[in-house]
Each structure stands twice: as structure tokens, then as C-alpha cells.
Amino acid sequence: MPQASASSNKRPRKLWWLVGFVLFALFTVLQMPAAWVLDKYAPDSPYVQHVSGNLWQGSAIWQLPLSDMPLTGAATWSWQPWQLLLGKIGADVEVSTGQTRLDGQVKVGRGSWQVNDISGKIAPETLASVVDWQLPNTPIQVNALSLQRQSGTAEKKAGFSQADGQLTWVGGEVGYPSGGKIFYITLPPLRAQLSSEQKNNQNLLHINVLNNQDKRLGDLYLDGDSMLDVSLTQRLLENMPEYKGQAPQDTSVVSVRQPLLLGLSEAGAQ
């Protein structure tokens, strides 16, 4: 009898068989070609092309159909398996287009997504492909940017529950078209501080734009429906030679509300 008992203890228990099967299935899924997964779940996506590698580690060419010509670039990813312990799918990512380089972490959970510690630079040619403005030949520096966005429910609207990080730009002369005429403004060195803010029962992304003396130049608010509210102060518009307005420097003298992805959605519809 003791010998039979000892022999049975040496046999793998059913729990270990189950654990082994789950791990085998997980690693089998992670070795699936990323191109096959894209063809199955997003076969007609105009935004991703030339996918290589697998779900664990791979790369892709992406494209945004803007109004004049597409903005194209590359993306690479490396899976973070420990994020599964937190109920999320996470990866280290790097995104590039031209001289633009951004890297950090992306996490997707149930009803939310977030990006953490995104750093790098956005090159002036990338900016010029997004907006039809004359821009200075200086990049925007991205410093430890983090965002978390929650999906909407029946009880709560979608919105940004967390935000942190900075964007910095040395500024320069900007020319933007309006009403068939180009207006010029000389932007000072500026810093955009990101935070989340609750306003009108919504969780908004707040971008506070400051000069190098920490004086307010304007505010941008982005809601969960991708509507962007822009407010510019007298202090900023005083850098425009043709502006003749009179007001205290902290007064908001220009306010605009529009969809964030207006240009992209119009291009996609064409």
C-alpha cells in the first residue's frame, strides 16, 4: 500500500496538466502570424499594411488617409506578458514616420485603453502633413506622456480618466490660411501640460498651454466624443502683428469647437 501511494503522488495532478495546457495554448496563440490575425478581424482596414512577425513581436506599415496625401510610417511592438496579471493586454511600441519617433507602452483592458511614458519628437514635416499651415522647422518634444481613456456606458460617458506629461516647442513663425488670406503669428517657446479634468459631468483631457514664464497662452479640452474646444488668450494673440484687440492678457479672446479628426474623417469619406 505505501508503495502504491508514493507512486500516485509522483503522477502529475490534473491541475498541473490544466496549467500546462493553458500555457501551451497561450504561447501557440502568441506565435500566430500577425498578418493572419489582421486579415481575419480587420480585412479591409485602410490604416495598416505589410504586417510581419507575430502577436508576441512584430512590425507593420501604417497609413492615415489625410486630405492631400496619406501619412505613412512604421510601427513595431513587443508583448508584455505580465500585463495579463492585471487583466490587460500590453506591449512596448515604437511608432515612426519620417523624422518623427515616439516610443512607450500601450495597454488595452476591458472598456479602456491607455498609453504610458510616451516620449520622443514630432517632426515639422509630420505636422505640415496634418495641418495646412506654414510652420517653423522645429520639432515638438514629447515628454513622458500618459493617457487613459474609458469607454462609455449607459450610466457614464466616455472620457479621459487620467492624463500626465508635457509637450514642448521652441516656437517660431506660423502662417495659417483663413478666408483666402494667410495670417502670421510668432509663437514664443511654449509648453503644453496634460491633465484630466471633470467638467460638465464629463472626464476631459485638458491641455494647458504656457509660455516659458508659465504664463497662460490658451487651453484645449478634448472630450470622449473627440470634440475639441480651443481657447486662446490675449497674451498669445499679441504676437500676431495684425491683431489689434485690447483685453487683459489672461482673457480668452478666441474660442473654437470642432471635431478633432475632422480632416481625417473627411479624407476617409472621399
Image (spheres, rainbow, N blue to C red):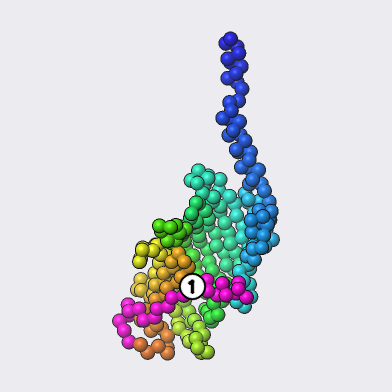
Q: Residue at x 57, y 56 (%)?
A: 93
Q: Secondary structure at mark 1?
A: strand
| Above/below status of 21 relative to 67 | above
Image quarter of residue 254: bottom left
- Which residue matches tag 1? 259
Q: Residue at x 61, y 60 (%)?
A: 75
Q: Position of residue 118 (x, y in %)?
A: 50, 60
Q: Residue furthest front?
A: 154
Q: Residue at x 36, y 63 (%)?
A: 201
Which amino acid, mark 1? Pro
In the depicted view, which residue is nearer to us: 26 or 156? 156
Q: Residue furthest left?
A: 248
Q: Is residue 257 magenta?
A: yes
In the depicted view, which residue is nearer to us: 4 or 215? 4
| Above/below status of 115 relative to 4 | below
Image quarter of residue 58: bottom right
Q: Position of residue 111 (x, y in %)?
A: 48, 54
| Above/below status of 238 relative to 125 | below
- Determine crowd level at label 1: few under 14, some 14-19, many 20+ residues with C-alpha closer than 10 A: some
Image quarter of residue 217: bottom left
Residue bounds of the magenta highlight = 246-270
The number of callouts visible is 1
Q: Residue at x 40, y 67 (%)?
A: 206
Q: Is residue 253 magenta?
A: yes
Q: Position of residue 211 (x, y in %)?
A: 39, 74
Q: Quadrant of the C terminus?
A: bottom right
Q: Quadrant of the N terminus?
A: top right
Q: Position of residue 218 (x, y in %)?
A: 39, 74
**Residue 249 shown left or right of residue 242 in the figure:** left
Residue 193 in sight from this viewpoint:
no
